[in-house]
Image (cartoon, rainbow, N blue to C red):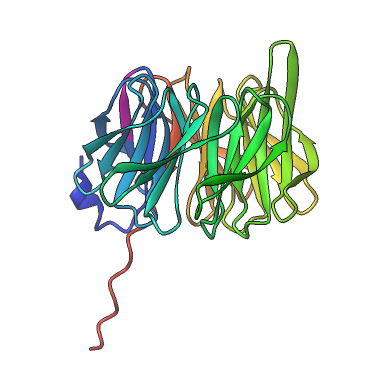
Amino acid sequence: MLGPAAMAGTGRSLAYVTNVNSNTVSVIDIGNNNTLVDTIPVGTGPQDIAVAPDGKHVYVTIFVDDGVSVIDTATDRVVSTVPVGTRPEGIAVTPDGKHLYVANRDSNTVSVIETAGNTVVNTVRVGAGPQAIALSPDGKHAYVANLRSDNVSVIDTDANRVLKTIAVGTAPVAIAVTPDGKQAYVANAGRANQPSNTVSVIETAGGAVAGTVMVGAYPNGVAVTPDGKYAYVANFFSGDVSVIETAGNRVMTRVAVGDSPSGIAVTPDGRQVYVAGAPSDSVSVIETGGNTVASTFPAGVAAFHLGITPPPAKPPASPL
């Protein structure tokens, strides 16, 4: 298998997949038949994952160890572990790559990490059970889905304080912001006695829910395409993915992907959607052109979340 250093010259993106029950991260070459190129040991119970804008580092929340593992993608090894709050789940990196925002579910806080030194520089108290987090494209706001208080906290990242709290559906567990920053899509999983199966659409300018979209059972992940036209929602109990057309906020189709899809990510070119499924220990690939599953391949035990690196920059053309 090619090592990570060799992969850097292939011009391909890589998918990093957290495997909850094997305490590893799988590295997949998505441009070469989804070939496994490395497996990285991390801490106990890896959850969410964020990729630095330059692709040089990948950050993984470690649920049981209350930390964040920092992976150097040149070597695919953990180079640092940052202690954060209790039971960290969601994680997001600012567009300039200088800070990480980490949702600590059982501390009801968000840790702010400065990536230059991999140190916590601030802690922000939010709602109950912060589960997921997404940043606006300009990096000025962090949106935190609070599982237990059924709302979203909006953090001003300059002051690191909560500006607003927005009520959404029952038990929000995932969130994504459109590339233009105008909407945030929030997956509301619901509870055993309070089913939700919805996605709340927040208009960020006004800070209010502008619409609600019915999706499959227990929506557990959401990702928006680079052109902002579609939101893909992984429905854990339905075994499928709802495709929402953002212009009218309606479900165009649902794509069956197998047991318990959870993490979801769109490739940088918008042509494919990668969906991790925990019980099947696998990842399914949806072709966005026809919304069909093109392939399914094995990952680690209880594949949960995933992130995709940007393709390496092309060298400048020779003047000769």
Q: Position of residue 181 (x, y in %)?
A: 63, 57
Residue 68: in sight, yes or no?
yes
Please tell me in which quadrant of the rendered image residue 119 appears. Answer: top left
Boundaries of the magenta span: 22-26
Name the main secondary structure of what is drawn in magenta: strand
Residue 212 magenta: no
Of residue 197 and residue 126, the one placed in the foreground of this image is 126
* Identity of the residue drawn at 73% across and 43% down: 201
- Number of callouts: 0
Residue 296: in sight, yes or no?
no
Q: Position of residue 82 (x, y in %)?
A: 29, 35
* Identity of the residue drawn at 60% across and 30% down: 127
Q: Where is residue 153 in the image (x, y as percent from the top left)?
A: 62, 39
Of residue 137 and residue 85, the one placed in the foreground of this image is 85
**Residue pushed farthest bottom?**
320
Q: In this view, does 164 lie above or below 181?
A: above
